[in-house]
Every structure is written in structure tokens, then in C-alpha cells.
Image (cartoon, grey):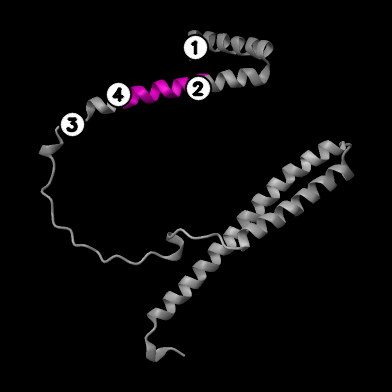
Amino acid sequence: MRLETYSWLAVVLAVACAAINWLGLAGWMAALVILVSLAAHVAGNALGTRLREATDRDLATHRRPRQAVAEMPRMSPTHLEQRSQLGWLVPVSAGIGATCGGAAGTASLLAFTASSLPGAILGGLSSAVIGALLGFLGASFVEILRTSLREAIAAEQAAVPADRRA
């Protein structure tokens, strides 16, 4: 490396230290993210422009004649491909998760921290939202797993010939 490179490195390091002192570490990091985003945007535009200019625009000369494509028979859509109601399991699980999460969050804040009652209630509401989300996700997973297994078993039974069924 040349002396000029080291000089530029020293200047950048000095500016970075001054920015940390003036803006604080979080402000300097935010400025760095913005500068990197701008540099990536400019580089992406330059790359896109170069690729667009290098592209052959006369596509009609390179096209092959259309070939007849055989139509594949369409399968009927499965239950998971169709829109359907959630069922009773998902909202009940979300409600149970919200209740348990809210109660556990409020009790934990009151027992283990020096939180005031309004703070504990607000924290309990946050815990209730997280509990409801976890209940919803768990119940949705169980519902999809149950439906998938039911369809797989039905498809397997339909594929077995009638004389081989037990």
C-alpha cells in the first residue's frame, strides 16, 4: 500500500472519530447506514444501466417458433389451496394464549420488578399480545398439520385398489 492510501485511511478514521464524538455512536452508525445505502443505490443503478445497454433489443430474431404444448390434466385443488374458515381451534387458542400471557406478564412484573401498577398492566398487555400471537401460531400449525395428514391418508387410501384394502 502506498503512503497516499494510508493518508486517506487516517483522514477517514479521524472523521469517523469526530463524528462519533459529535453525533454519538448511534448517530454515526445511522449516518453510516445511510451512506452505504446511497452507495449501494448508485452502484445498482450503474450496474442496471450497463446491463440494459448491453442487452440485445431485437428479440424477434431470436425467438423460436411456438411448439404445441400438451395440456396436462388439472388436479382438483386440495383443502390447503382453498380459502376456508379458521375453525374454532385458532381463536380459542389465541384467547387462551392472550389470557395466560397477560396474567404471567403482569404477575412477573409485579413480583420481580419495582414496577408500578399501571406499568405492570401495560407490560401485561404487551405480554398478552405476544401470548395471543404464540397461541395463534401454534393452533394454525396444528390445524394445517391435521388437515395435511387427513388429506394424505385419504389420498393414500384412494390409491390402494379396492381388493387390497383391509
What residue is pinned by disc 4? 49
Residue 17: image quadrant is top right
Q: Callout 2 environment at 10 Å: few (<14), some (14 to 19), or many (20+)?
A: few
Q: Is residue 70 above or below residue 120?
A: below
Residue 49: image quadrant is top left
Q: Identify the residue at horizontal 47%, vertical 90% (top origin).
A: 166
**Residue 165 location (% of width, % of height):** 43, 88
- The reply to whether dot 4 and dot 3 touch (C-beta < 8 Å) is no
Q: Is residue 24 left or right of residue 118?
A: left
Q: Callout 4 environment at 10 Å: few (<14), some (14 to 19), or many (20+)?
A: few
Q: Main secondary structure of the magenta part?
A: helix
- The reply to whether dot 1 and dot 4 touch (C-beta < 8 Å) is no
Q: Which residues are magenta?
A: 35-49
Pointer 1 or 3: first along the chain? 1
Instruction: Report how far apart the C-alphas of labels 2 and 4 lie in the structure.
Output: 20 Å
Instruction: Report how far apart the C-alphas of labels 3 and 2 lie in the structure.
Output: 32 Å
**Residue 107 location (% of width, % of height):** 85, 47
Pointer 1 or 2: first along the chain? 1
Q: Callout 1 environment at 10 Å: few (<14), some (14 to 19), or many (20+)?
A: few
Whether residue 79 is in magenta: the answer is no
Instruction: Report how far apart the C-alphas of labels 1 and 4 lie in the structure.
Output: 30 Å
Q: Identify the residue at horizontal 59%, vertical 10% (top origin).
A: 15
Q: Identify the residue at horizontal 64%, vertical 9% (top origin).
A: 18
Residue 106: image quadrant is top right
Q: Is residue 144 left or right of residue 57?
A: right
What residue is pinned by disc 3? 56
Instruction: Report how far apart the C-alphas of labels 1 and 3 lie in the structure.
Output: 40 Å
Whether residue 37 is in magenta: the answer is yes
**Which of the two marks, 1 or 2, is nearer to us in this view?**
2
What secondary structure is marked by label 2? helix
What residue is pinned by disc 2? 36
